[in-house]
Amino acid sequence: MLDKDIERVLVSPEEIHAAVVRLGAQLTQDYRGKEVVVVGILRGAAVFMADIVREMDIYLDIDFMDVSSYGEETESSGEVKIIKDLDTRLEGRHVLVVEDIIDTGRTLNYLVELFKYRKAASVKVCTLLDKPERRIVKNLIPDYVGLEVPNEFVVGYGLDFKQKYRNLPYIGVLKPEVYQ
Ligand SMILES: O=P(O)(O)OC[C@H]1O[C@H](OP(=O)(O)OP(=O)(O)O)[C@H](O)[C@@H]1O
Ligand code: HPA
């Protein structure tokens, strides 16, 4: 039913799975023996978060944070507002931030600085998708990237358009008429 709104599939479920398995193996290797807190950023990262932690064969804590950007329409502001903060203390712990997509980089730039301020032992970023063409915060370079996507608005596997399409099992581009 949702498929009828999709113009084309950019990343298939199989390609997503392959990226998740590859990242999970790398993260398992890199974080073995470390006190790690995996922080998922609501709501987009919820689907990826559920999959990636099950590919990490190490002891870890999970927590979630919900943030929203001000001035999203105009892109005039880089301010980020905390809707739901973490319940976990980060001091001395290794933080792995899990995102669905990095676009301008503003959300993650804010969060990385916040977690460093909270005295995390290290802060690294794992994103399923990276859209480097849209980057405004040029020094925001994710440590772990599943796939690069072109400068197009994408939905599915957690990513929404007006809160819908997060439950698609693939990443796709909407038909132009859906935006009307
Ligand atoms: O790199 P940026 O330009 O900051 O954009 C990336 C952010 O935008 C999306 O979240 P959104 O605010 O749409 O909320 P959602 O996760 O609830 O969909 C996405 O999940 C990232 O958090
Ligand atoms: O391409 C996108 N799709 C959905 N949400 C987003 N947030 C930043 N970029 C995107």
Image (cartoon, grey):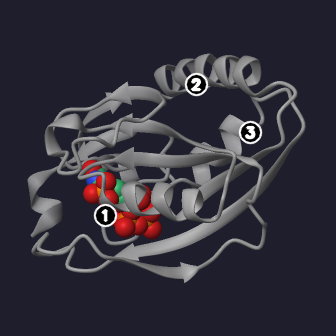
Q: Which residue carries the number 2 mark?
A: 17
Pointer 1 and pointer 2: residues touching (CB < 8 Å)? no
Real-space Cα distance between discs 3 and 1?
25 Å
Q: Is residue 173 above or below residue 150?
A: below
Residue pictured at 40% horizontal, 75% vertical: 68
Looking at the picture, how far across and down is residue 47, in whole percent? 59, 50
Circle 3 or circle 2, nearest the eye: 3
Residue placed most toward the observer, 4 or 112: 112
How many residues crowd around disc 2 within 10 Å: few (fewer than 14), some, or many (20 or more)? Answer: some
Q: Is residue 111 above or below residue 75?
A: above
Q: Which residue carries the number 1 mark?
A: 161
Q: Is residue 86 above or below residue 125?
A: below
Q: Earlier in the sequence, mark 3 or mark 1?
A: 3
Query: What amino acid type is highlighted by mark number 3?
Result: Val
- Regarding residue 41, the answer to whether it shows in the image is no
Q: Which residue carries the number 3 mark?
A: 53
Looking at the picture, how far across and down is residue 144, in whole percent? 50, 29
Query: What amino acid type is highlighted by mark number 1?
Result: Phe
Residue 7 horizontal side relative to residue 155, left or right: left
Residue 97 horizontal side relative to residue 63, left or right: left
Q: Is mark 2 within 8 Å of ligand 2?
A: no
Q: Quadrant of residue 160?
A: bottom left
Real-space Cα distance between discs 1 and 2?
22 Å
Tag 1 secondary structure = loop
Q: Quadrant of residue 130?
A: top left
Residue pictured at 58% horizontal, 48% vertical: 97
Residue pictured at 11% horizontal, 74% vertical: 76
Q: Earlier in the sequence, mark 3 or mark 2?
A: 2
- Regarding residue 83, the answer to whether it shows in the image is yes
Query: What amino acid type is highlighted by mark number 2?
Result: His
Residue placed most toward the observer, 127 or 155: 127
Q: Is mark 1 within 8 Å of ligand 2?
A: yes
